[in-house]
Image: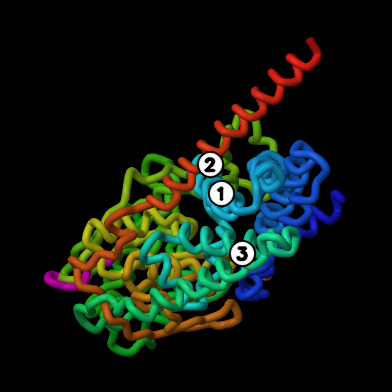
Amino acid sequence: MRAACLLAGALPVLTFPRPGLAWLAWVVLVPGLMLMRSAPTVRAAAVRGWWFGGAYLFAALYWTIPNIGPGLLLVAFVFGAMWAGWGAAARWLPPLAAVAVLPCIWVAIEFVRSWPRLGGPWAVLGASQWSHPTVLSLAALGGVWLISLVLVAVNTALALALLSPRHRYALLPYALALVAVGPAVYAVRSAPPADRTFRVALVQPGVVHSPAARLAEGERITARIPPVDLIVWGESSVGYDIASNHEVAARLNALATTTPLLVNEDARDAQGRISKSAILLRPDGTRERYVKTRLVPFGEYIPFRSAFGWLARISRAAGEDRVPGTGNVVMRTSPGGVVIGPLICFESTFPDLGRAVTRQGAQLLVYQSSTSTFQDSWAPPQHASLSAVRAAETGRPAVQAALTGVSAAFDAQGRKLAWADTDRRGFTVVTLRTSAPGVRTPYDRLGDYVAHLAIAVSAGTAVAAAAASARGRRRAGDAER
């Protein structure tokens, strides 16, 4: 039974790129739910849920093994425990209550593990629908959390319909109605009003380990780009401190004499600190800087280094902690020009960051990335796909310039406009329709209300379960007396 739970937990990874079986997300949880629902006791269902959750996380994060090593087993074991409550609820709740509550518990788990100090929200189930604009339209209403909620609700209804014939005729129409919600929203919602046409070039030099060679390759590619409104280099594209290296600064300024250039600095500064910064160089000589705020656990810092610092000796975990920034900024590409919201790599996983720069006035989300460590894994396309979700949530077009791929661009509804995979070298030019500054999606205005509601329902269920358990113990005590 343990092997079955592990297999059921690993299956959802197939819904994300590269396998890309997004349609499977509508049924992929059914085997796991049936295993938990059929457990002999609530306690046994909780254990099955734990195994399911651990396998889910291990499969989704397998590509982090070079950075975490055996630490991934610890991550999967500890955080997989959150699914124990999901498993217990699947066994304890009556069918019609389970259809309402289990999706909320799942979303509450996703929301809790998305807290930065707990690692971040990689492989949120709703993100599996990034390539389906009709389903993705739900993100504009309630963020990626609403998509997850609908997917889990459909899975729950199908699993219970198989196990509870008496409720089948109520559950199956419910599932079909939920499947139709996304297309219905897509049909009635108009595209966000556009402000202007904006051409962006994404530079992708590939895996070049030497900072000098990487800078030279970026220059070579940039020199061939036709007239555009903005050129974006990937994460760690400049391995020098621009403020102190005047030669490098002069070379970059020369590239930005006619077109704004957004580069990414990954270097030690004059005080000896290392951080990652998006730096916009404008033709008028203005420079603007954003320092990466959300760092990658183990890749850019080691949480609780005093306890887990040993991982750096047996893996490629961060040898020292980078210095995080203090908050988001927006940048204007020219006086009176388009306002961009720069974010760096791992930050594309966080819905609140895209929403934050949008509320600050960003008309275009710009992500800079490098996944060279994970080049041959499923991580690069999964990472690029997240820009589609952030675009749909905020009603802003989004681009990702990845040093080694995947570079991508999406319109304000999350529809794919460009995709340069990891085997591509050179530049990609995409024409976007930037959103008007005052346009806001319901998610922009209301935030994570779906997740907050899910947490409230989950907490209420936990209280009800505890009360029921206490009553059961009292009855057992009375019977003994």
Residue 171 - label: 3
Residue 458 - label: 2
User: Amino acid under label 2?
Assistant: Ser
Image location of residue 458, percent across then percent down: 53, 41
Residue drawn at the location 33% of the way across and 43% of the way down: 326
Q: Is residue 195 visible?
A: yes
Image location of residue 389, percent across then percent down: 45, 67
Asked if residue 355 lies left or right of residue 360, the reply is right
**Front-most of residues 55 and 61:** 55
Q: How far is the residue under mark 1 from the one under mark 3?
A: 14 Å
* The C terminus - image quarter: top right
Q: How far is the residue under mark 2 from the one under mark 1?
A: 7 Å
User: Amino acid under label 1?
Assistant: Val
Looking at the rendered structure, the secondary structure element under dot 2 is helix
Looking at the rendered structure, the secondary structure element under dot 1 is helix
Q: Residues within 10 Å of mark 3 (few under 14, many from 20)?
A: many
Looking at the rendered structure, the secondary structure element under dot 3 is helix
Q: How far is the residue under mark 2 from the one under mark 3?
A: 21 Å
The reply to whether dot 2 and dot 1 touch (C-beta < 8 Å) is: yes
Of callouts 1 and 3, the N-terminal one: 1
User: Amino acid under label 3?
Assistant: Leu
Q: Which residues are magenta?
A: 335-340
Name the residue tied to disc 1: 101
Of callouts 2 and 1, the N-terminal one: 1
Image location of residue 26, percent across then percent down: 62, 69
Image location of residue 340, percent across then percent down: 27, 66
Residue drawn at the location 24% of the way across and 84% of the way down: 197
Q: Is residue 247 visible?
A: no
